[in-house]
Image: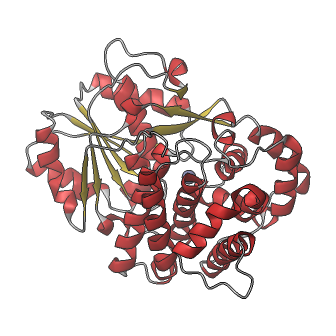
Amino acid sequence: MKNFLFQTVPVLHFGVGCLAELPGQIAALRASRPMIVTDKGIVDAGLIAPVEETLKVAGLAVTIFDAVTADPPEKTVLQAIDAAKSADVDIVIGLGGGSSLDTAKVVAALAVDDAQPLQEIYGVGALARKGLPTILIPTTSGTGSEVTAISILTTGETTKAGIVSPHLFADVALLDPALTRGLPADVTAATGIDAMVHAIEAYTSHNGKNPVSDMLAIEALKLLTAHIETACSDGSDMIAREAMLRGSMLAGQAFANSPVGAIHALAYPLGGIYHIPHGLSNALVMPYVMQFNLEAAAPLYAELADALAIPCGAENSDEARAQNLIDHLETLAVKVKAPRKLRDIGIAKEATSELAETAMLQTRLLVNNPKEVALADAQRIYDAAW
Ligand SMILES: [Zn+2]
């Protein structure tokens, strides 16, 4: 067996009602001046009020930064850092989907004296040290951002760039499935498929794949595929909601160590250029990238098909079982009514060449793909997805 490294957040609180642990966790981190980093949607959904109330009851004065937007631009992150510094906060609490949690991680890292400039910390391992303590509270079951050491920001107009550093791991991840109860069906579907993609790409990653991430990826994919339909059709089903949040967390722990590949690399330009939500972007390119990968990844896809107990016919070769996995995921995506083609979301056929060129810039991700992706391959994949 190869040597491996596995890292995750030191403290996980999971379960309905565990939001109540927040004041105690802040105290345990010896902090008392929290800033909540979130977005207007969370405020409008009524999710911030109970958190604010919990903190006020505990005697804590709260600063709220609620200007995070999807595909967070650098400008917003810099504003949040300024707000944190001027309020002299000593702990950052991210509340929301991936954009809010990713922003919170960078704000915590840089809202300290002598912080590096934001420009310097992009890439893998460029962030030199840990900043303020962080508690992350997800309100979607998708990104797994609460347990990853990755933040994705939008630089310039359209490019998505990642900051990857163990210093971005939260001190505490607090996962309360009750916070996901109100998620609309389309968001539940797209974020759930994103989480499945995390599990699949972690399991087939060319770098960092290890026995712990494998175990997490398999359990994640079992939970997510078994519960996504119910979570979408009956959002108040807390068994399904709990399973989806648990699945997305486990997938997050897996890909934090065994990083994602070409599905994400080809999804990012859809977010960067067209502001298609991250989960939906992944859902749209997933089957076509998997089909492209099949040649190299068939044995691993076959293992996942077996783990999900997908029935195989008379033909039970790796290739046949791998194809069954791709077909099974596509069937699920159709059942949860995720858009299936780029043309369905208003993308012009001519746009695919710009998408392919932009995807090739995601070298950080493409190196993890089980099969090398050239520009012509990316073009063919987008053409198939169109
Ligand atoms: Zn993702």
The correct choice, above or below, for 314 with respect to 266 in the image is below
Quarter-wise, where is residue 45 in the image? Answer: bottom left
> Which residue reaches farthest bottom?
314
In percent of the image, x 55 and y 20: which residue is there?
A: 119
Quarter-wise, where is residue 153 in the image? Answer: top right
In percent of the image, x 44 and y 28: which residue is there?
A: 79
Quarter-wise, where is residue 3 in the image? Answer: top left
- Number of numbered discs visible in the structure rendering: 0
Residue 28: image location, x then y, percent = 12, 40
Name the residue nearer the viewer: 360 or 255. Answer: 255
Residue 386 in sight here: no
Residue 294: image location, x then y, percent = 75, 61
> Which residue reaches farthest top?
114
Q: How is the image coloured?
A: secondary structure
Indicate the quadrant containing the C terminus: top left, top right, bottom left or bottom right: bottom right
Q: Is residue 135 left or right of residue 195?
A: left
